[in-house]
Amino acid sequence: MLGNTYDTQVCSIARTLEVVGERWTLLILRDATFAGTSRYIEFQRRLGIATNVLSDRLDGLVQQGLMVRRGGDRDGVDYDLTDKGRDLTTALAALTEWGDRYAAPDGPPIVYSHGTCGGAVRTALVCSSCGKNVDRADVHAAPGPGMPFEHLERMKSFRRSSARRDPQTSRQVS
Amino acid sequence: MLGNTYDTQVCSIARTLEVVGERWTLLILRDATFAGTSRYIEFQRRLGIATNVLSDRLDGLVQQGLMVRRGGDRDGVDYDLTDKGRDLTTALAALTEWGDRYAAPDGPPIVYSHGTCGGAVRTALVCSSCGKNVDRADVHAAPGPGMPFEHLERMKSFRRSSARRDPQTSRQVS
């Protein structure tokens, strides 16, 4: 739904941002995910957003498969998250957590708790093999199957030139 | 660094997006976090971005306290992440994960592994009380201390009107 400004960026963050990087889009997904909003008129009231902008963003989410539309006329229509849309939950929660820490002087506007035990919900990096929480300094990045050869070569040359300048680059893509 | 379009949005996602929602900014943070990039000229080469845009985004990150600048002339200068900047790691990883799943037809361009055991790194919702992984359907959202009274009233009225229309709204902010 945004222009493909990142053609040269082979990166899943860049590709995610092409789909949901427009800020109203993320706020629509936030309300759908955490407030259970589905009705068009309720998105409009909650976000205070012009109807043409809202319709455009919702249509985009449907086109991209993150929502499905059901119902009749515009005000009575509902937009429901698909699994693809719901799979952004952790990303939304992580963005919220950062804002709660650094940009919420009066405390979190909304708190998320674990329905089962009532504890505060946090986001974390976890290892799918040993199951432990992973310290961010212990994350190793390496090229995967989707990295084109020419990018790989370019990254290698960056790494070599950086290594010559500064040996403290152990967390570079290698 | 973006206009405060979200004055009426009392939400930590909205506030986070005001700081890092511009897409080049997130890509700069990605390279700093996962590739260890710090040198101005390396950001420029990796991102293929106009120097005036890059300088503007880096200056913004310094002003917002996510990076610190060190060194002399522009090409030789380094930009290092602060804790505030590094605390976006999980959000960046979660955006990456979604893109790997839904927008990487050739597989992940970059894979993240646990340095200690080599397992794949994933993001998760975890409970800070019982320590368990939290299913996204088991997250309860409620107003926190930073929610202004007038917003609270507005949300309550939405919930009441939604509840009359549809009893299946148990995941709404309550």
Image (cartoon, coloured by chain):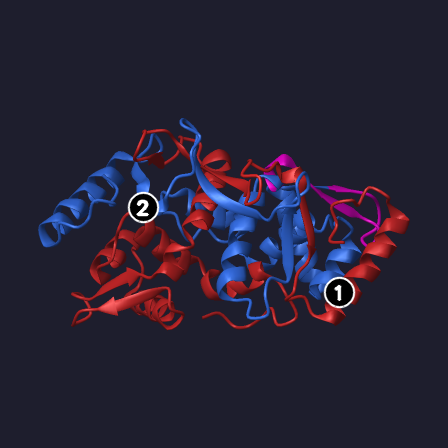
Chain colours: A red, B blue
| Residue A11, picture quadrant | bottom right
Image location of residue A8, percent across then percent down: 66, 70
Q: CA distance from mark 2 to mark 1?
A: 39 Å
User: In this view, which residue lies farthest toward the right?
Assistant: A164
Q: Which mark is residue B160?
A: none
Marks 2 and 1 in Cβ contact (< 8 Å): no
Q: Reply above or below: A114 against A4.
A: above
Circle 1 sits on which residue? A152
Three-letter code for the amino acid on which mark 1 is drawn: Leu
Image location of residue B146, percent across then percent down: 36, 33
Report the side of A2 relative to A142 (left or right). Answer: left
Image location of residue B57, percent across then percent down: 64, 54
User: Measuring 89% from the left and 48% from the top, which residue is drawn there?
Assistant: A165
Report the side of B53 relative to A69 (left or right). Answer: right
- Between A74 and B104, the one lying in front of the other is B104
Three-letter code for the amino acid on which mark 2 is drawn: Ala
Is residue A117 in view? yes
Image location of residue A138, percent across then percent down: 67, 39
User: Measuring 51% from the left and 39% from the top, which residue is drawn there?
Assistant: A124
How busy is the neighbourhood of tag 2: few (under 14 within 10 Å), some, or many (20 plus)?
A: few
Circle 2 sits on which residue? B137
Q: Which residues are magenta?
A: B69-85
Residue B44 lies in the magenta stretch: no
User: Dividing the image into 4 quarters, which one contains the C terminus of chain B?
Assistant: top left
Name the chain letter of the residue that bears numbered label 2.
Answer: B
